[in-house]
Image: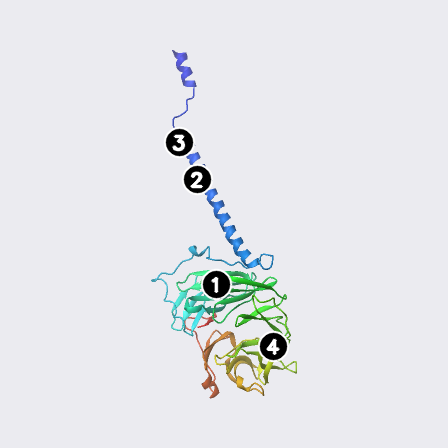
Amino acid sequence: MRETLSHQVAVTRPLSADPAGQAIRRANRVRRRRAGVGLALAAATTVLISASVAQLGGHSGRPPSPIVVIGDPYSSGRPIPSASSAAPAPAPGTSLDFLVSGALTSADGERLPLPGIGPAEHAHLLPDGAGWLVVGAPTAAGRSLWVAQRDGLVQVLLAGAGPITIAADGRQVAWRDGSGLLMAGVVGTQLIGPVRTPAPVDAVPVRFVGDSVLVRLDPNRPGHTLWQPGVGELTTGADRKTLSVYGALPDGRLVGQVSGADPRQTCLALLDPQRDLRPVRTGCGPELSPDGVGGTSPDGRWLLVNGTVGKAGRSLLVDLGQLGSDVTALPVGPSMVGTVSWTTDSAATYIDGEGKLVRVDVDRVRAGQPAAPAPVPGVQPGERPVLVTGS
């Protein structure tokens, strides 16, 4: 009896249920499922990014450095301001919207936070006031282009790009990328139909002239050319005199700064875009700044431009009707930084070197009353606002 019982105890019988083994097998199954999902997501992300890069790189045979993002994959992680937490968005069409420290600020002091946007170089209103295009300040990695919607949601369109310029109507952008230039349309929160052309190493887009892109060939030498995307590749053209281009007249001619007969002298000129930017009318007199900052009024009569009075840098008002003879410029106020925004044929605004707002009234300047800088609402000491254009 004792021997029979001892044999029964020595035999190990399997448990009908093994809790530890079940837990381990369950954990292994979970890990396998998670690994499968992770691989699927990684594959999908790779396909999306590859498709985006291929869309821009198809013309050049190599993947460009900027990435066009269609639907920001990180937007779900960004806070979307609610009606109770975000200030109302500034109304479209106002001439006094500013980008300050990652928030859009109106002249009334209303603020709309734009998460993810750091220091900016330029901000431009989208068509129909649907939002804003924001060009980031240059960094070691290049520039970024963001689109900010009116609910505060921000998406990146370009990263790692060279200089970026935006069309006056906000429907097109052009930028430098590696060995070439690109142009694309802006529809909603997407860049569409990119067109690429090879370009000299120092060539950068400056502004849009209709559907063409004005390109400066070398920042250290005079000379511009026009690139017509989709029509042909970039050509160097015959212009070797134009230093800066400030804007366009209603008839299509451009207003620019050209080198004079004396290498130390610069003059203003009307340039014909149909004839390799050949000067049509020229006028000399004011001492113009080489920074290229300036802008023409909508009716094409006035030019607001940086220059020098005595030894001090000032903004100057020039009547373009004087071109063809000696030109006289009227002092306006402190030098401009960034862009100038003409709101009517006789009124303009800009930001000066101290981050203050300068409102220009042509009639008052002509009467001998220069513009006086004023603080921008909501701007703290040390902050530098960016004036929103296109409004």
Residue depth check, mark 4 versus mark 2: number of the one nearer the observer: 4
Residue at the image position 43 percent from the left and 18 percent from the top = 10
For numbered disc 4, what is the local secondary structure? Answer: helix
- CA separation in Å, label 4 and label 2: 70 Å
> Which quadrant is the N terminus positioned in?
top left
Residue at the image position 53 percent from the left and 79 percent from the top = 305
Q: Pinpoint residue 30: horizontal percent, then vertical percent.
A: 44, 39
Q: Pinpoint residue 149: horizontal percent, then vertical percent.
A: 42, 63
Q: Pinpoint residue 202: horizontal percent, then vertical percent.
A: 62, 67
Residue depth check, mark 2 versus mark 3: number of the one nearer the observer: 2
- CA separation in Å, label 1 and label 2: 39 Å
Upstream in sequence: badge 1 or badge 2:
2
Callout 1 touching callout 2 (CB < 8 Å): no
Q: Which of 90 and 237 is in front in this view?
A: 237
Q: Name the residue under label 1.
A: 146
Upstream in sequence: badge 4 or badge 2:
2
Upstream in sequence: badge 4 or badge 1:
1
- CA separation in Å, label 2 and label 3: 16 Å
The amino acid type of the residue labelled 3 equals: Pro
Q: Pinpoint residue 7: horizontal percent, then vertical percent.
A: 42, 15
The amino acid type of the residue labelled 4 equals: Arg
Q: Name the residue under label 4.
A: 275
Of the numbered discs in the image, which one, if any, rests on residue 30? 2
Q: Name the residue under label 3.
A: 19
- CA separation in Å, label 3 and label 1: 54 Å
